[in-house]
Amino acid sequence: MHKILLIESAGTERDHIVELLEQEKFELIVAATGETGLELAQQHRPDLILCALDLEPQADQQAGLPILRAMRLHPELTVIPFVLLTHNPDPIHQRQVMAMGADDCLSRPISDSELIAAIATRLSKQAAITERYITVLRNTAEQLNRLANYDSLTDLPNHRLLSQRLSQLIDAQEPVALLSISLDRLRQVNNTLGYPAGDELLRAAARRLKASLPSSITVARLTGNQFAIILVGDLDAQTLMAVADDLMGVLSQSFSLPGQEVFITTSIGIALCPQHSQDLPTLLRQADAALDWAKQQKSNYCQIYRADMPVVSGDQITLETWLRYALERNEFQVFYQPQMTLSSGRIDGAEALIRWNHPTHGDIPPGRFIPLTEETGLIVPIGEWVLRMACRQAQSWNLAGLAPFQVSVNLSSVQFNHPRLSQSIAAILAETGIDPSTLELELTETALMQDAETAMQTLQELKQLGVRLALDDFGTGYSSLSYLKHLPIDTLKIDHCFVQGCATDQQNQVILQSVIALAHRLDLSVVAEGIETEADLDFLQRQGCDVGQGHLIGLPSDAESLRSQLQSRYPTPFSCAISPTQSIITP
Ligand code: C2E
Ligand code: MG
Ligand code: MG
């Protein structure tokens, strides 16, 4: 029932309107003065106001106008249709009243049907306006909800909605598996093909993930390259691994991006509720810890959380604060992983790899903190420290030992693009007295792609210092082989993803054969990283690969244990007396 406020002095005209409107089943509120009218309007919020222009007792001919003005200035009453009843039939007068904000102006005498029709028109217009208003509000609310709960790039639920759904499940005591998934090569795609290509990759990956799972399963995008999936139910490890394998399989198919077809690898970490935790933030961190672990293993690897995995606080700021002190508190150490000359079976070099032992959180893997040191610029002093330690170590080995021994040191792209790079390396060379040709710097394609011209200049400056240059993780950067011949580099390090299992993987065999052949034609030495089995080593030896590195040959270890490990196992510059044939690996 519509509510009408009638503002009119007592009298026969008012009585008649009251009777008429009550007959028409309107709910009626009556006020005799403007002041009461305003009060009642605020109190009852009527659907329409009928107001006489001349009101008793002042007998003011225009008393309705101040009420109209007051209504129009009021933030909420202004939307209520206002119909003025006047005795003045002059159309100019009527137009003036309308211009002041009245929705209609009826001049007396007014027939019943005229009054009812005017009211009906106003009410139906008002209903249309309200409906439109509600639609706009509803759309806006929906948009706000999407912005707050969904990722705008992929349209998947975001961290907030994922957390909400997870906590509902945890509260309902449902068993849950949280899968944290990372696309390992997004950064390379962004750097080499540009951000639009990276965005397209993310969208396509999101579509594939969603399409490969029943629609009831939540697939969310957490951050840059990280997705998450909630599986509800009591699932055993075998089932979870099978699901993870399927997801990795789906994402390992090629992606057609503008200008290039690319392949990516995926890492997955899983944490279970209630087995691992019933606390949401802890569960999220455990899934991340398992993911970090998986990333450290090999490409396309899935790991279920174990209690011995370091759960670093989800708060990156904590990690960053720790990092700022780590150098001065001597928490870093340089490990060395042996590199074997495959033709002789001798260990002629080692790669320096940083290790961080946090006093309370134990070992934090480089994959976890190196990206943060790059973001914060801390990689510059930390990288310089690694370089200095490795050069000192190499010099002491060379002084103690007999044959020259080479150390390889990783240079991040941030270091590579730092303006004082060659001065700082020259200073370390001078300070440690190392023969520059026994130092190899490992760069990635990412470092070289950022600004090709400056990169070339830097490479030449480094070459002038007499050091050797290697291209690390070769094959993961999408750059063409043809640009290699323009680079003043000495070594190609083939990424472990092509090496692992190469003895049986025909596709990788073809890649390795052609990369080795091409590298040799360009006078480059080839290092294969990640050799884990005799069969893989054997294949690489037969292909004429120059140098091998991997767990089979030796794990990264501190300088002292490297020395004793080598002395007991392989012919090395430290123990030249042992002939190559005595090596356990050399055929
Ligand atoms: P990278 O330069 O490609 O180093 C090779 C990585 O492969 C090392 O991981 C090494 O421990 C691991 N690895 C060696 N052999 C095997 C094997 O047979 N199987 C498997 N699955 N893995 C093997 P790590 O030490 O965790 O380092 C990871 C990455 O962190 C390095 O990749 C490098 O990019 C970066 N990094 C490490 N130390 C430094 C450093 O001092 N400076 C800079 N800028 N980056 C560093
Ligand atoms: Mg390396
Ligand atoms: Mg590498």
Image: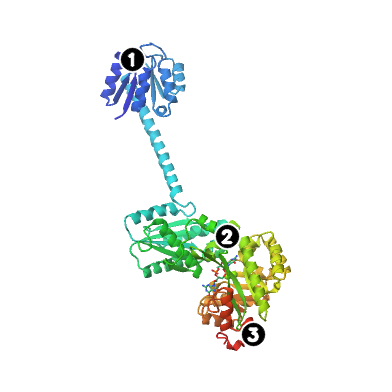
Q: SS at mark 1?
A: loop
Could you give the CA–CA distance between mark 1 and mark 2, rounded to whole angstroms?
81 Å
Please tell me which of labels 1 and 3 falls first in the chain.
1
Q: SS at mark 2?
A: helix
Note whether ligand 1 is within 8 Å of mark 1: no
Kind of residue at disc 2: Thr
The picture places residue 281, in percent across and down from the top left corner, at 42, 56
Image quarter for ligand 3: bottom right
Please tell me which of labels 1 and 2 falls first in the chain.
1
Note whether ligand 1 is within 8 Å of mark 3: no
Q: Is residue 521 above or below residue 165?
A: below
From the image, which quarter does the N terminus lie in? top left
Pointer 1 residue: 9
Q: Is residue 223 left or right of residue 405?
A: left
Kind of residue at disc 3: Cys
Q: Is residue 213 above or below residue 168?
A: below
Q: Residue at x 32, y 59 (%)?
A: 174
In which quadrant of the rendered view does residue 583 lie? bottom right
Q: SS at mark 3?
A: loop
Q: Which dot, 2 or 3, sits closer to the camera?
A: 3
Note whether ligand 1 is within 8 Å of mark 2: yes
Pointer 2 residue: 373
Q: Is residue 190 visible?
A: no
